[in-house]
Amino acid sequence: MKKISKYITLIITAFQISSCNNQDKEVKNTDLEKKYKLMFIEKRQINGKLCLPGVLQPFQFVQIYPRISAYVKTVTVDRGSIVKKGTVLMTLEAPEIEQNEASAKLKYAQAYSIYLTSQDKYKRLFETSATPGTISPYDLEVAIDRMKGDSATAQAELANYHAMETMKNYLTIVAPFAGVITERNVHPGTLVGPGIQNTKAVLSLQEITKLRLIAEVPEQYATQIDKSLPINYKINAIPGTNFEGHISRTSNSLSTTFRAETIEIDVDNTNNQFKAGMYAEISVPTIGNLNTFVVPKSAIITNTEKKYIITYNNNKTKWIEVSEGNQKNDSCEIFGNLQLGDKLIINANYQIKDNQEIKVE
């Protein structure tokens, strides 16, 4: 019985193997018998749309640091405070700076007084010298030199006083433009200034009534953007709503990191519907290149890393790596090692091998 069961098992296995072989032959025969459509590669223009990710950024943004070392006296704003240009944001106190400013003011007043005295003395000597023999030329020259020296000293003390006055003005921090305070990192009594290590910005200010929508255009599309056409965009946080704008400015150069050109769209936000940092999907109209090869999308084979097309010249197939450009309906721009007049397989697939003969319609 055991021998009979072994024979039965061997017969079944042989039948299965034979069946699989027959199926493989059928598949191969089917692939070989399949006919493929060919077309000549042509050049034409495709005007399309380029979809890009974008992000909203403040039109103006500044992180505020004190110019001098001092203690925080008052903070008149907090996170979310809306301020106008010139609004006092915080005041600092540094007694030594106030004393230096007062001392510089007194020194200037003293130097100016000495200058006025020497100037008056020179004028009197000059008037007296009109009478011959009363004043020697040497005494007149000494009086002139003294007056000039005192004048220079007074000017130096005035410059020092203005410098001390400017330092004192640094104790009052004002808003450089209208906006909203987005960050506050200090409280009264905090020591701040350039001499303090690991000091954060005391305040952050952003202009939010106007925003910049920023996107990066890949190198291959950088010359195809038409700035005169309107740009449509969607904000991810506001689904179901389409917005429109125009390209306000471009960098006119490619970044070395991403090989892309930066474009900016000014966004009006007077109604405060957008927030800086929101992501957007931007649809940018593009003008196709007249000298670009255009093929049906069905001719492009895609794997996880690259894209290919298959040409058929001299009764042999050839796989060619390509990159895609503008797309419209069922057509797509391609870039690669191609020549005008090459024959292309329209219904290409992975079953076609390189340097293979196929049947064509």
Image: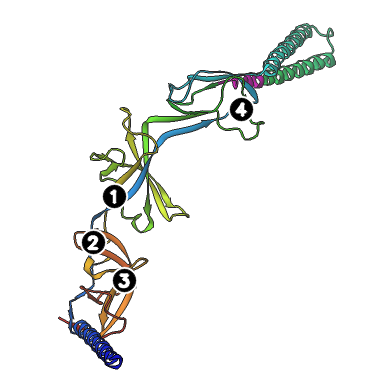
- Alpha-carbon span between mark 2 and mark 1: 14 Å
Q: Earlier in the sequence, mark 1 or mark 3?
A: 1
Going by the image, does 176 lie left or right of 246? right
- What is the span of residues highlighted in magenta in the rendered image? 162-172
Label 3 residue SS: strand
Single out the mark in the foreground, 1 or 4: 4
Q: Is residue 164 magenta?
A: yes
Looking at the rendered structure, the kind of residue marked 3 is: Tyr
Q: Are marks 4 and 2 in contact (CB under 8 Å)?
A: no
Label 1 residue SS: loop
Q: Is 34 above or below relative to 335?
A: below
- Alpha-carbon span between mark 4 and mark 2: 57 Å
Q: Earlier in the sequence, mark 2 or mark 1?
A: 2
The residue tagged 1 is 226
Q: Position of residue 112 (x, y in %)?
A: 71, 12
Looking at the rendered structure, the kind of residue marked 2 is: Gln
Q: Position of residue 332 (x, y in %)?
A: 25, 63
Q: Earlier in the sequence, mark 4 or mark 2?
A: 2
The residue tagged 4 is 67
Looking at the rendered structure, the kind of residue marked 4 is: Arg
Marker disc for residue 308? 3
Identity of the residue drawn at 49% across and 32% down:
62
Q: Earlier in the sequence, mark 1 or mark 4?
A: 4
